Amino acid sequence: MALASATCALLGTSLAPPADAQEDPNWDFNTSLLYYGEDQDRVQDLSFKSLTTRRFTDDRFLTFGLTVDTLTGASPNGTIRQDVPQTYTRPSGNGQYTVPAGELPLDDTFKDTRVAISANWQQPLGEKGLANIGFSASKEYDYLHTGINARYAHDFNQRNTTVSAGFAYSTDSIEPVGGAPIPFTPMLETGNTSNRLGDQDKDILDFVLGVSQVVNPNLVLQVNYSYSNSDGYLNNPYKLLSLVDPITGDTLERPPVAGGPSHEYRFEGRPDQRTQHGIFTQAKLNLGGKVLDASYRYMTDDWEIDSHTLDVRYRWPIGERGYLEPHVRYYTQTEAEFYRLSLDSSEALPAFASSDYRLGNFDAVTAGLKYGWKTRNDNDMSIRVEWYTQSGEVPADQLIGNQASRDNYPDLNAIIVQFSYRFSR
Amino acid sequence: MASPCEVLLEDVTRATATEVTDAVAREAWRIEDAFSRYRSGNIVDRINRADGRAVAVDDETARLLDFANTLHELSDGKFDITSGVLRQVWVFDGSDRVPEAAAVASVLKRVGWHMASWKAPRLTLRPGMEIDLGGIGKEYAVDRCIATLTAMTDAPGLVNFGGDLAVSAPPTRRNAWKVAVEGPQAGAPERVLDLRRGGIATSGDAQRFLLRDGVRYSHILDPRTGWPVEGAATSITVAADTCTQAGMLSTLAMLEGKGAEAFLERQGVRFWCRR
């Protein structure tokens, strides 16, 4: 204190505000635990995620990611409800499961553990450039992903404008439980794998071009264009369609075979190519410490799925160290060109067909709240709770006979709870 | 300032940048000319050549002498602007030429602020005594230049004179000013500090020492004994409200030898000590 006042006297100034200096941490750990649970005992996911960043001098960073997911629960198998019980062969070909009359057919064998790792190196290139290269891999019981990615961003206009370009390439191999079914072949009795093929693969190539612009100190705008091309096995090997009577719309019964399914079910088939284009726009607005983050995304692809996503977050400081962030997201998409509820047995088989509800026409709303705060050691903690609801509709011209009086689209409600903790060393 | 000097300004036009850096450079040169002991004819030179006569000083010099006086008291005599003459016997060139005890004792007779008579505006030194404001001057210049900068623009700025630096305000484009502190190898930053307010100064110089019979003599001299402080850190970086405070605390901590960390803990400042 004596030194502080002596310094004031020397400099002829009033007492300087307290210094604010700290060592830039070398290690940053970002961890989170997320629970995702769908109602009616459908998919439950417990996910642990960590990102560890080592900071080097000259703004160079090495980041390692680790994600472990454990998935359990039941998932719609793609066939329609019936007024009688339905019996199915499990994907493995070992054993059967039966769905009671009137209920949505769910395959309850859904159980998986997924481990994903990633590594990313970031460094400035010259005065105004920033480069990233990365590698990723993940393994599930029936799936192996490996990918590489790179991105370059360049600042212009006194760092008010940033133009970036990136690409990602991944090659995935799929080893479906029980083998990959040949599209449109029937679900067979237990132990019969005559319509199964071996391992499959697909390659995905992504490009993204972006511009972000600082309009003024309180407003940042961003626009991205993205292109994605998938090539290879794009089917879901566990999804089926019901083969139905052209008049009643009921699923045809299958001649009884020991260990066979009760009705006629056909494995789905999708094109082996998919090209998507997307436009993403985002505005971040600082309103005197409160931050509004609004974004809109439009996606279109050659499967004829067009989607719109509107996402709004509002970050509201609470006291010195906390904030509250409400979040609302609205999503809507049209169905894929080959989406259909069932296969009409009187018609020739189409080239492609899938009843996967994710390829259908649906709307989804996510609404939630996040509370975050800084701990005494300047670590960040947050807890987020969100509700997700998805409801869709099968186009009326696809409904045959009795189907019109049934609930065909499997609506979905889920809850998401996430706890995050970030600390530095 | 005998070191690279820089001014960083955020979000200003070229014209403002030129105007501010020119003014900062003028202020830095003014302080160097006025208080460097290497300039002849300035106030320090006149004091050092007064040969026992009283010298009347201007207001700014008086403030610097008052400050030196306060530091002398606060440090129990360890900080002493009259200790510079010890350099006549101590040359820290990495060699083993440790001076004779008798030679040190002889020079030490001319060291000691308590032997000076200071009553503003008059300073009287005994014949043969000298003052050196170099231990205060650079940090003082940084803070003065920050004042110059602040008077001219609201834009956040940083003034760095050879690693002793201060900022006028936190930057707006990023969270903090990034300050790299050099490690044992020149040009290789040992750590990066985030500075939003205040100043940073570093004392110590790994290249300046003497080595004889396995004993390392640091260039930090205790003006009370005339001999190097034992157990001095290799370098000490301190962040404080002003660059001057940071500089004085790092210097005083150096003089504490092994007790540097404990001393700085008591001051309640952030510091980084390398041994």
Image (cartoon, rainbow, N blue to C red):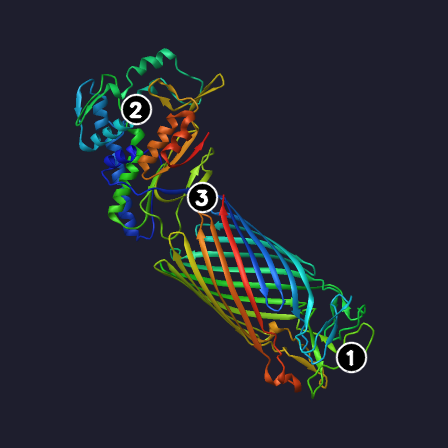
Determine the secondary structure under disc 3.
loop
The mark nearer the N terminus, 3 or 1, is 3
Please determine if labels 3 and 1 lie on a single subunit. yes
Q: Residue A269, located in which quarter of the rendered image?
A: bottom right
User: Real-space Cα distance between discs 2 and 3?
Assistant: 34 Å
What residue did someone put label 3 on? Answer: A24
Tell me, yes or no, whether the two marked residues, 2 and 1, touch with CB atoms within 8 Å.
Answer: no
Give the residue displayed 68% in from the left and 84% down from the top: A249
Residue A413, placed above or below residue A408: above
- Is residue B262 toward the left or the right of residue B134 in the image? right
* Residue closest to the eye, B136 or A343: A343
Mark 2: which secondary structure?
loop
Q: Position of residue A40 (x, y in %)?
A: 62, 69
**Kind of residue indicated by mark 2:** Asp
Kind of residue indicated by mark 3: Asp
- Image quarter in which the N terminus of chain A is found: top left
Q: Are marks 2 and 3 in contact (CB under 8 Å)?
A: no
**Residue drawn at point x = 27 percent, y = 37 percent:** B28
Q: 10 Å neighbourhood of mark 2: few (<14), some, or many (≥20)?
A: many
Q: Position of residue A181 (x, y in %)?
A: 74, 70
The reply to the same-chain question for discs 2 and 3 is no
Circle 1 Cα neighbour tier, 10 Å, few/some/many (<14 / 14–19 / ≥20): few
Chain for disc number 2: B
Chain where mark 1 sits? A
Query: Which amino acid lies under the numbered mark 1 shown in the image of this protein?
Result: Arg
Image position of A373 with respect to B210: above or below:
below
Q: Position of residue B122 (x, y in %)?
A: 17, 25
Residue sitting nearer the eye, A87 or B3: A87
User: From where the camera sits, is residue B5 visible?
Assistant: no
From what the image shows, is residue A272 above or below residue A159? below
Instruction: Give the residue number, with chain letter if any, for mark 1.
Output: A254
Residue named by callout 2: B80
